[in-house]
Image (cartoon, rainbow, N blue to C red):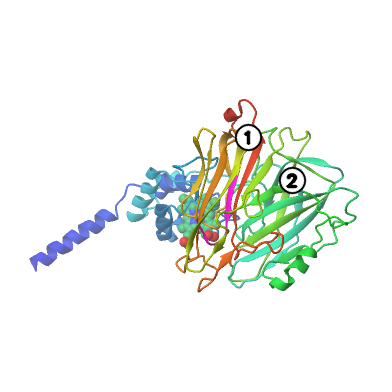
């Protein structure tokens, strides 16, 4: 009897101890969440639910504990011990510990008068006041709880040829759009009579036999069937990621009087009920021509270097592939973008100089299809002439890969049938896009941060 009482008392003491913490939401936790989470987790934000009030945070505390301790949130798949980029999202060890101790200590709210002010968020642009805004046609996203992929086109007519400093894509329901990659087709005035004739939307779930006809119905070529010139990555979107804006004088492009922005592709996450997406594009013009227009080179699928061994992934297997490219001149790298689909497992890229020094670019130990950032270096990164850039990637086509689109697994490969256009998510790709400038003396000291 006595023993039982003691055990009971000890248990009580342990519970009491577990539930007591000096940490409070208003003083200790809100500042961490405002800094690291609420840019996405707010009403109108990129995440599916808000974490801007104590009640919301308290309701979700168990999942918050899980995702903050595992590193899943805030989302930043690149290894910060390997290389650094602008806008890295991470919690310090101290912040992680605070969240843990606070939740395990009973998650008390504290003195509400001490709650700091929620940061101000502008819903209509993250980077300033646009010169003009244009809208994609609305897209109906059916509520069958499956991922949706579309190609969408947006014909744009300007009064004259203009210089563009940045193009910003913003979905109206931004927690619906999971990513968008936009390239701009620039038409010469006499090469295409009408840019408005084509279809505006291609649902990528279309049967394979109809795909080519549907793609052609977008009418993207010049009237004589040739291809117009194109600006790759004119606008890209990922939840919580700002449009690419470099310091004045770097980047930017020319936009002809007639152009079509093609979202190739746009990915919507699963939803249980039908909804319409109506996405906009903010355009920021510049009066001066781009001083140092940026170049892009792509390794891998459809790119400048082949994949070794070829990207064919047998069912039930984990495979390794590489790609490499020699850089003939001194270049300065600004931004990099690794790209794979659902079977991606890990990704690494680095350069080896002619003297065999290695320059780290990026390592993503645990690939996450959902977070395909464009990673911008804090300062331009010089790669000397004669260096070789290496990409190494692993793909997981086993049933253990939760993102495997097939059950049981099937052979998955990259496909060239459609000239590479509109490759499906259920096919595989391995790409590494590098945005670069010809090197100029002192580039390595040029900061790419824009306030
Ligand atoms: C870049 C935008 C962004 C930031 C920053 C961000 N989240 Fe998220 N979060 C999301 C999105 C989007 C989802 C939905 C998951 C998905 O679609 O894959 C999500 C999901 C979650 C979930 C649910 C996970 C699950 O398994 O159900 C929790 C909990 C969460 N976030 C907490 C946080 C916390 C805490 C922070 C800050 C430490 C944070 N998030 C920062 C975008 C973000």
Judged from this view, the residue extending furthest toward the left is 2
Residue 297's place in the image compared with 353, above or below, is below
User: x%, y% of residue 54?
Assistant: 45, 54
Q: Quadrant of the C terminus?
A: top right
- Checking the image for residue 41, the label placed there is none
Q: Residue at x 44, y 42 (%)?
A: 81
Estimate how packed mark 1 is, as few (under 14), some (14 to 19) or many (20 or more) residues with alpha carbons within 10 Å.
many
Mark 1 and mark 2: Cα distance apart in space: 28 Å
Q: Which residue is mark 1?
A: 331
Q: Which residue is mark 2?
A: 283
Going from the N terminus, do you reach mark 1 or mark 2 first? Answer: 2
| In the image, residue 379 lies in the stretch drawn in magenta | no
| In the image, residue 340 lies in the stretch drawn in magenta | yes
Per the image, label 2 sits on a secondary structure element best described as: strand
Q: Choose mark 1 or mark 2, whichever is in front.
A: 1
Q: Main secondary structure of the magenta part?
A: strand
User: x%, y% of residue 56?
Assistant: 48, 58
Q: Nearer the viewer, residue 437 or 388?
A: 388
Q: Residue at x 29, y 52 (%)?
A: 20
Contact between marks 1 and 2 (CB within 8 A): the answer is no
Q: Is residue 293 left or right of residue 198?
A: left
Judged from this view, the residue extending furthest toward the top is 441
- Is disc 2's CB within 8 Å of ligand 1? no
Magenta part of the chain: 336-345
Q: Nearer the viewer, residue 440 or 179?
A: 440
Per the image, label 1 sits on a secondary structure element best described as: strand
Count of numbered circles in the view: 2
Q: Is residue 61 visible?
A: yes
Q: Residue at x 67, y 57 (%)?
A: 172
Q: Is residue 249 left or right of residue 384?
A: right
User: x%, y% of residue 400?
Assistant: 44, 67
């Amino acid at each position: 009897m006595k023993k039982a009482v003691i055990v009971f008392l000890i248990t009580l003491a342990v519970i009491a101890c577990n539930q007591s913490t000096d940490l409070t939401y208003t003083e200790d936790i809100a500042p961490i969440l405002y800094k690291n989470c609420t840019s996405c987790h707010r009403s109108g934000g990129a995440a599916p639910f808000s974490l801007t009030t104590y009640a919301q945070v308290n309701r979700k505390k168990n999942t918050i504990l899980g995702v903050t301790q595992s590193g899943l949130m805030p989302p930043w798949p690149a290894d910060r011990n390997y290389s650094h980029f602008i806008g890295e999202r991470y919690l310090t060890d101290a912040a992680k510990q605070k969240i843990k101790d606070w939740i395990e200590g009973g998650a008390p709210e504290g003195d509400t008068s001490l709650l700091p002010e929620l940061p101000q968020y502008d819903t209509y642009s993250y980077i300033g006041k646009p010169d003009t805004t244009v809208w994609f046609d609305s897209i109906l996203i059916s509520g069958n709880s499956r991922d949706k992929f579309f190609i969408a086109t947006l014909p744009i007519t300007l009064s004259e040829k203009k210089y563009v400093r940045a193009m910003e894509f913003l979905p109206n329901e931004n927690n619906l759009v999971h990513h968008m990659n936009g390239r701009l087709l620039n038409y010469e005035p006499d090469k295409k009579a009408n840019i408005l004739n084509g279809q505006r939307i291609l649902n990528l779930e279309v049967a394979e036999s109809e795909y080519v006809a549907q793609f052609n119905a977008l009418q993207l070529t010049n009237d004589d069937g040739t291809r117009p010139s194109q600006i790759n990555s004119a606008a890209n979107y990922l939840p919580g990621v700002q449009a690419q804006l470099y310091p004045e004088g770097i980047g930017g492009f020319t936009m002809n009087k007639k152009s079509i922005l093609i979202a190739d592709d746009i990915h919507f996450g699963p939803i249980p009920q039908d909804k319409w997406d109506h996405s906009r594009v903010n355009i920021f013009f510049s009066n001066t021509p781009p001083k140092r227009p940026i170049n892009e080179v792509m390794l891998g699928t459809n790119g400048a270097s082949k994949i070794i061994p070829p990207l064919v992934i047998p069912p039930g297997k984990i495979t390794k592939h590489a790609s490499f490219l020699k850089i003939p001149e001194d270049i300065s790298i600004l931004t990099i973008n690794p790209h794979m689909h659902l079977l991606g497992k890990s990704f690494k890229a680095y350069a080896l100089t002619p003297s065999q020094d290695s320059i780290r670019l990026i390592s993503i130990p645990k690939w996450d299809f959902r977070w395909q950032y464009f990673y911008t270096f804090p300062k331009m990164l010089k790669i000397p002439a004669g260096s070789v850039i290496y990409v190494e990637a692993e793909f997981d086509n086993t049933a253990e890969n939760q993102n495997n689109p097939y059950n049981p697994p099937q052979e998955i490969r990259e496909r060239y049938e459609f000239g590479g256009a509109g490759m499906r998510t259920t096919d595989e790709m391995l790409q590494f896009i590098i945005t670069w400038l010809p090197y100029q003396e002192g580039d390595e000291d040029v900061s790419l941060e824009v306030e």
